[in-house]
Image: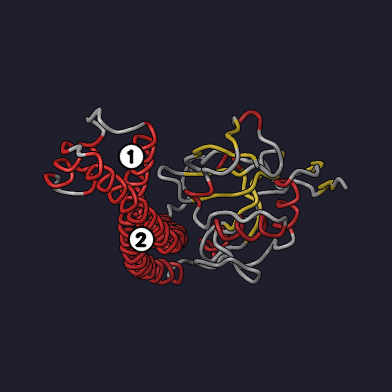
Amino acid sequence: MALILGVVLVGPAYADPPPPPGAPKPSDAAAQLASAQHEAEALTEQWHAAKDQLDARNEQAQRAQAAVEPSRQAAERAQAAEEKFRVQVVDKVTSEAMESGRLDELNALVLSDSPSDFLDQMTTLESFTSDQKAMLDQAQALVAAATEARTEAGNAVTRAQEAAAQARTALDEIGVRKQQADTRIAQAQQLLGRLSPAEKAARTADEGSPLGVVLGTSKGALALKAAMSRMGGPYVWGGTGPRGFDCSGLVYWAFKRVGITMPRSAASQASVGKPVQKSDLQPGDLIFFYSPITHVGIYAGNGKVLNAVQTGDTVRYSDLSRMKSYAGARRL
């Protein structure tokens, strides 16, 4: 069912207007907070990306490990089939050679360094029958299959070991990124506490709401509707709801509500769906900011973006024209 948003816009939107003459400049704490906020968000998103990578590496390691035993068993079956048939061929050819006096076949057997070498030498002789040749061809095919199976079994073990090592590296990366993010988050929280009441109010000022927007039934529109139900919820570093969110956590939660499991980081979310031009934005499209991408919101129509804005703030609408470093949009 379509949903109409009919909230009156609050004031005009401007793209970072210069302060009027005589207006107080932002305090050092406000400037430092803006920098700390961006860096903390970037580090948090790197932490999310490391967790995404760990999940992917663990799945890869599990698949690789699961392939080891079947590969080993296939190699054993191929080896047994090769040995059984080869013995039959060697015994048959040797017996027939002794009975017929064809010494070239006996010499091939005696002078061969390996069963495979024996088969190679036998194929160059012209003294064996068509039946013998058919048996030799089959034996050679079994040797080749066994060799390939043994190689694949060895490769499966190698892949499993490499995947496990990559998973361990990804796990270590999570710890590093989390520690870096926590340090910068703590600094941002301290700087937030140093802001004046007026500066705090300015950071969380209402930037208006979409007016008369009709939401369709696309997955993105339904996810937007889900995200709207969390309006006013607090910004929480690393939060995936339902009581608090960071920017990518809100997107993750909202799309999960409509049956789509997104990657956890904003940068990874930017690879989902198909690209959309800024001039063609529709409600439910994902909008990304900065390079590399560290912030994401959901387009709500009429130039508004629903997002978990920043520390000390809430889930609310932001004016797209005032948001810095637009990086692109995607549609699911």
Which three-letter amino acid code belongs to the residue tagged 1? Leu
Q: In x, y percent, where is residue 33?
A: 41, 60
**284 sits to left or right of 29:** right
Which residue is located at x 60 percent, y 40 percent?
Answer: 273
Which residue is located at x 79 percent, y 41 percent?
Answer: 213
Foreground label between 2 and 1:
1
Which residue is located at x 29 percent, y 33 percent?
Answer: 128
Quadrant position of the C terminus in the picture: top right
Q: Are marks 2 and 1 in contact (CB under 8 Å)?
A: no
Q: Is residue 31 visible?
A: no
Query: Label 2, on which residue?
Result: 160
Which three-letter amino acid code belongs to the residue tagged 2? Ala
Neighbour tally class for label 2: few under 14, some 14-19, many 20 plus, Cα within 10 Å: many
Q: In x, y percent, where is residue 162?
A: 31, 58
Q: Quadrant of residue 181?
A: bottom left
Which residue is located at x 71 percent, y 59 percent?
Answer: 257
Neighbour tally class for label 1: few under 14, some 14-19, many 20 plus, Cα within 10 Å: many
The kind of secondary structure element at disc 2 is: helix
The kind of secondary structure element at disc 1 is: helix
> Mark 1 or mark 2, which is nearer the start of the sequence?
1
Q: Quadrant of residue 159?
A: bottom left
Q: CA distance from mark 2 to mark 1?
A: 36 Å
In depth, the one of 95 and 252 nearer the eye is: 95
Q: Quadrant of residue 245?
A: bottom right
Q: In x, y percent, where is residue 204?
A: 59, 59
In depth, the one of 28 and 35 nearer the eye is: 35
In depth, the one of 28 and 63 nearer the eye is: 63
Query: Label 1, on which residue?
Result: 136
Q: Is residue 291 above or below residue 175?
A: above
